[in-house]
Image (cartoon, coloured by chain):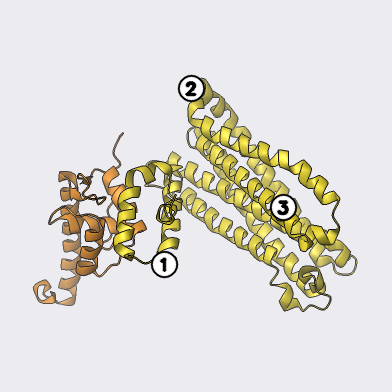
Amino acid sequence: MNDRSRLLRWYPAAWRDRYGEEMLALIDDEVGGGGPGLGLRLSLVRHGLAERARTAGLRGPSTSRDTDLRRGALLVLVAWSAFMVAGAGYSKASEHFNAAVPAGVHPLPQVAYDVVLAFGVLGGLLVLAGAAIAVPGFVRALQEGAWPVFRPHVVRAIALSATTVALTLPLALWAHQLSEQQRNGGSAVYSAAFLGWAALGVISLAMWTAAAVAVGRRVELSPRALQAETRLALALVAAMVVVTVASAVWWAGMAAYAPSFLTGAQHATAAAALFNLPLVVAMGIMFAGLALSSVGVRRIARA
Amino acid sequence: MARQRPTLRRQNDPPVLILASLADGPKHGHALIKDIATFAGVELGPGALYGAIARLEEQGLIEALAPVDRRRPYRLTAAGEAALKEVVRDMHTVSSVAAGRLGLSLGGLA
C-alpha cells in the first residue's frame, strides 16, 4: 500500500473498492506533486470513520423510531468501550496512589477513586444487563441463519483476544523479573512490549464492540426489550458522566496533595501534576466517549 | 436494495451543490470541486465530496459514467433533476418571501 492509498485506510473496504481509485485521482488533482497536508489527512480520517459508522449502521437517515433507538443505544455502547480503554489508563496511572495520599489525612482522592470504581463497575453491570436482554433475540437470529453475518466479526475478535491472552503470561513473567522502576518506563524494550500488548488489547476490545454492534443492529427486539435497552443506555451515560467527573476530582486532589506521585519528581508543583500524559490521554478519551454518547442520547431523545 | 428517500436540505449542503453543478452536464470529482467553488464559494474537500456523491448515488439522484483515465464522471438522473427542481422551488419560495418582506426586488439582487 503506497502513501496515497494509505490515506483511504480509514474508509471501509467496500467503499474503497467502489470509490478509492477515483478519489485518489481527485487527491492527485488537488495536491498536484506535493504531499497531502494535515488538513486533508484529518478530513479523510473524519469522513472515513463516518463512512465506517454508516456501514456499521450507527449513522444515516432516520428510517424508523426503532432504528433511532437502536442506533442511539449502540452509540452509547461504543462510547462505553472507549471508556474502558480510558479506565485502563486511569487504573495504571492511579496504581498505589493511596500510599502517597493516606485517606485519613486527605480523604478526597480516595473518595473520588471509590466513586470511579463503583460507577465503573455499575457501567459494566448495565452493559451485561443489556447483553442479557438481547440474548433471546440473538439466539433467534442464529436459528434463522444469521451466523454468517456475525461470524467474521466474532472470529476476528476471538483471534485477537486469544493472541492478547497468549501474550499476557510471558509479559507478566517478564515484568516479575524487573524492578518497579524498569516496569514504569526504565526499560525501553519492556515499555515497547507493554504498549504493543496494550494496543492489542484495545484492538480486541474494538473488535468485540464491532461484533456487538453487528449483532445489536440485526437482532429482533420486542418494543419492551428495546425500551429497556434504551433506559440502560441512558443510565450508562449517567454512569460515564459520574466517572469522568470523579476522575477529574481525583486528579485535582492528587495534584493538590501529592503532585510528586503524578510527576515522578521529588519537588513538583500542582500545575506540573496536571500535565501527566497518561491521565491527559485517559481524560481525553473519556471526553471523546461522552461526546459520542451525547450523539446517542440525542438520537434516543429524537425518537 | 431499496433506495432511501432523498433528504436534501440547505442550499449549502454538499448534495445540493453537487446536483446544481451537474445540472449543466456530467463532471468528475475535480471538475465538481472547481465548479462549486466558482458558483457557490464553497471549498469542498475530497472526503466531503465523495461522502455526498456516495449518498446521492445510493438515493439514485446521480449515476456514474464510464471512467476516463481514473476519473469517473457523474450525471444527474431524472430523479436527481426532480429533486433539484424541488429544492430550487423551496429556495425560491423562501427568498421571495424574505425579499418581499424586505422590500427588495430579486432581479436587482443578482
Please tell me whether mark 3 or mark 2 is closer to you in this view. Answer: 3
**Residue at left offset 18%, top offset 49%:** B75
| Chain identifier of the residue bearing label 1 in the image | A
The mark nearer the N terminus, 3 or 2, is 2
Task: Measure how far apart labels 1 and 2 are at the Cα level.
Answer: 47 Å
| Disc on res. A288 | none
Among all residues in the image, which is located at the extreme left?
B107
Q: Quadrant of residue A132?
A: top right
Depth check: give the residue in front, A230 or B63. B63
- Amino acid beneath label 3: Phe
Local SS, label 1: loop
| Disc on res. A145 | 2
Look at the numbered discs 1 and 2 and tell me whether their residues touch, using CB distance below 8 Å.
no
Instruction: Count neighbours of disc 1 (C-alpha within 10 A) and say few if under 14, some if 14 to 19, many if 20 or more.
Output: few
Please tell me whether mark 1 or mark 2 is closer to you in this view. Answer: 1
Q: Colour of chain A?
A: yellow
